[in-house]
Image (tube, helix red, strand yellow):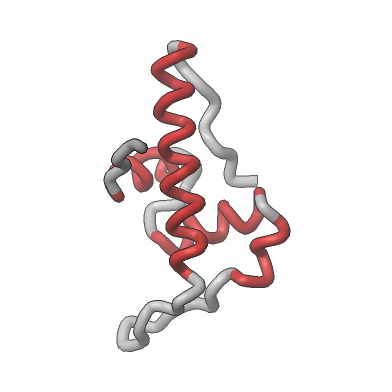
């Protein structure tokens, strides 16, 4: 088991233009097409967070850990792409 801070997730995904949870969920949904139908709708500031967001949080934390480990092992790894 490993700890991954939210800041690490934002650093990894920030490099592909995803500075917040909503944009991170978009990048994850683009790469994992089976999750796209579960992507939460745009949230207004007064709305509570959709429960489906936790799916994308979990995947983003796993990917951030993967890219951190890969980067330290290989001396520089590819980051997730925004396409």
Q: Which residue is pictured at 44% across the width and 14% down the height?
A: 73
44 with respect to 31 (left or right):
left
Rendered position, 52 above or below 35: below
Extreme-bottom residue of the structure: 46
78 with respect to 51 (left or right):
right
Rendered position, 23 above or below 31: below
Counting the numbered discs, the total is 0
Q: Nearer the viewer, residue 49 or 81?
A: 49
Q: Nearer the viewer, residue 82 or 38?
A: 38
- Percent x, y for residue 63? 49, 41
Rendered position, 63 above or below 55: above
Q: Which residue is pictured at 35% across the width and 83% down the height?
A: 48
- Percent x, y for residue 54? 44, 66
Q: Which residue is pictured at 36% across the width and 87% down the height?
A: 47
**Image quadrant in which the N terminus is located:** top left
- Percent x, y for residue 33? 72, 57
Q: Nearer the viewer, residue 55 or 11?
A: 55
Q: Which residue is pictured at 59% across the width and 39% down the height?
A: 81
- Percent x, y for residue 62? 46, 43
């Amino acid at each position: 088991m490993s700890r991954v801070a939210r800041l690490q997730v934002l650093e990894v995904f920030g490099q592909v233009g995803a500075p917040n949870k909503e944009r991170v969920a978009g990048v994850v949904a683009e790469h994992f097409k089976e999750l796209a139908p579960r992507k939460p709708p745009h949230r207004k500031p007064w709305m509570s967070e959709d429960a489906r967001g936790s799916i994308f949080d979990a995947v983003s934390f796993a990917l951030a850990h993967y890219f951190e480990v890969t980067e330290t092992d290989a001396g520089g790894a590819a980051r997730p792409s925004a396409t």
